[in-house]
């Protein structure tokens, strides 16, 4: 049940800058898509190549942070 509520809340923030922490990674980028099982973050920190699409399982997320614009 929590995963559904978590996904619904994330879906309201699509288009926001986000930091997503898993057990092994801290992913920074733009929250692009949210489903019941997956989150898509577009990594924009890579300045030379195309933006990287990172799919993250909802179950693998430890926390999400929405940093303020500098």
Image: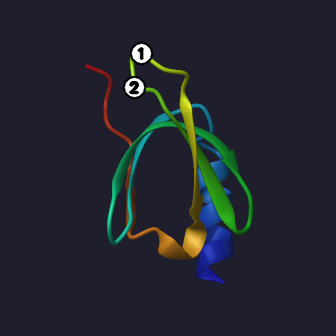
Q: Which of 43 and 68 lies nearest the eye of the viewer?
A: 43
The crowd level at tag 1 (other Cα within 10 Å; few <14, some 14-19, many 20+) is: few
According to the picture, the residue beneath numbered tag 1 turns out to be 48
Does residue 13 lie above or below 26 as drawn? Answer: above
Is 65 displayed left or right of 59 in the figure?
left
Quadrant position of the C terminus in the picture: top left
Q: Residue at x 31, y 30 (%)?
A: 68
Is 40 displayed left or right of 45 in the figure?
right
Quadrant position of the N terminus in the picture: bottom right
Q: Position of residue 37 (x, y in %)?
A: 70, 68
- What residue occupies the far front of the structure in this picture? 49
Q: Image quarter for residue 21? A: bottom left
Does residue 44 lie above or below 52 as drawn? Answer: above
Q: Are marks 1 and 2 in contact (CB under 8 Å)?
A: yes
According to the picture, the residue beneath numbered tag 2 turns out to be 46
Q: Position of residue 24 (x, y in %)?
A: 32, 67
Number of numbered discs overlaid on the protein picture: 2
Q: Residue at x 55, y 76 (%)?
A: 59
Does residue 21 lie above or below 42 as drawn? Answer: below
Q: Residue at x 32, y 23 (%)?
A: 69
Q: Residue at x 46, y 68 (%)?
A: 61
Does residue 44 lie above or below 41 as drawn? Answer: above
């Amino acid at each position: 049940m929590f995963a559904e509520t978590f996904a619904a809340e994330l879906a309201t923030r699509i288009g926001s800058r986000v930091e997503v922490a898993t057990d092994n990674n801290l992913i920074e980028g733009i929250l692009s898509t949210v489903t019941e099982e997956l989150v898509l973050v577009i990594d924009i920190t890579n300045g030379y190549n195309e933006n990287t699409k990172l799919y993250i399982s909802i179950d693998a997320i430890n926390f999400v942070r929405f940093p303020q614009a500098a």
